[in-house]
Image (cartoon, rainbow, N blue to C red):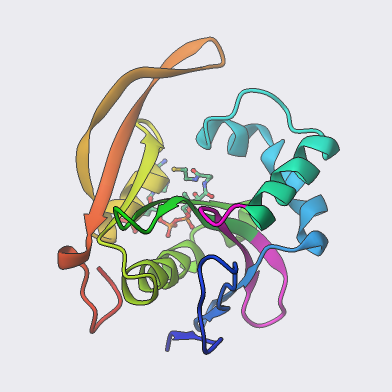
């Protein structure tokens, strides 16, 4: 059972509803989540999969958090395990554009034990409901490394379609990396089941 917990939603005032499912609860990222997030973004596996090349310092992290708070085009959530509230990862929408009604989705599960448990899948289900049902977006898109099979499988299972490949778009560990652009349109999203 999925539900949006807060009643009202205003984009410009940065009021983000909490989102809850059976496995995860998504809460707006706050101060208390920064230390764990910093650890994760500097983890070599997360760094390479989210296509980051330089390590993040505490100052960078504070600047990123300040930007999230002040920028209405960014909505970032901490992913908490439903039972015990343990912080297991982060997700968000960037480039939220209410004129063109689109946003870029991203996610990582920093907690290794939470991968392969369905937590990412439910997070994506909740974020799609936020995008298509509550924000009224017509398009959700994302960028994923061509070789990042766990992420590509997840997105394909959720009905994201490949738009194309950005060839040699990043240099990670001295190697060129191709990026797949994927998207889902509002008319491809199943409002009833909340699954595709
Ligand atoms: C991407 C991520 C959130 C997915 O979460 P997850 O819990 O691992 O995802 P799931 O286990 O639900 O699904 C992964 C799918 O990939 C498959 N998979 C896992 N490892 C794989 C591999 N090495 N090769 C091929 N398929 C693989 C799984 O079988 C599963 O397939 P299914 O969808 O057909 O069932 C998580 O792996 C993660 O945080 N990765 C690091 C950050 C990242 O890559 N973020 C996305 C950037 S675009």
Residue reaching furthest left? 187
Whether residue 180 sits left or right of residue 61 in the image: it is: left
Answer yes or no: is residue 59 visible: yes
Q: Which of the 4 image quarters holds residue 42?
A: top right
**42 or 59, nearer to the observer:** 59
Which residue occupies 54% across, 10% down?
174
Quadrant into which the C terminus falls:
bottom left
Where does residue 96 sit, x and y in percent of width and height?
Answer: 43, 54
Q: Residue furthest top?
A: 174
Residue 53 vs residue 121, the one in the foreground: 53
Q: Is residue 84 found inside the magenta-colored segment of the image?
A: yes
Q: Is residue 139 magenta?
A: no
- The quarter of the picture where residue 152 lies is top left
Q: Which residues are magenta?
A: 71-88
64 displayed left or right of 141? right
**193 is higher (above) or lower (below) than 138:** below
List x then y, in percent, for residue 63: 75, 41
């Amino acid at each position: 059972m999925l539900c949006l917990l807060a009643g009202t939603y205003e984009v410009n005032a940065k009021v983000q509803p909490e989102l809850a499912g059976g496995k995860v609860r998504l809460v707006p990222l706050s101060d208390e989540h920064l230390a764990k997030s910093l650890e994760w973004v500097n983890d070599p596996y997360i760094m390479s999969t989210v296509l980051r090349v330089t390590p993040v310092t505490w100052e960078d992290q504070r600047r990123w958090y300040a930007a999230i708070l002040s920028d209405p085009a960014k909505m970032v959530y901490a992913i908490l395990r439903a039972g015990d509230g343990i912080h297991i990862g982060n997700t968000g929408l960037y480039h939220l554009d209410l004129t063109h009604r689109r946003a870029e989705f991203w996610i990582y599960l920093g907690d290794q034990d939470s991968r392969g448990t369905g937590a990412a899948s439910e997070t994506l289900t909740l974020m799609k409901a936020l995008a298509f049902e509550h924000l009224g977006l017509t398009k959700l898109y994302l960028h994923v490394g061509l070789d990042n099979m766990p992420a590509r499988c997840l997105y394909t299972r959720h009905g994201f379609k490949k738009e194309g490949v950005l060839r040699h778009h990043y240099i990670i560990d001295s190697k060129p990396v191709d990026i797949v652009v994927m998207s889902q349109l509002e008319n491809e999203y199943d409002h009833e089941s909340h699954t595709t």
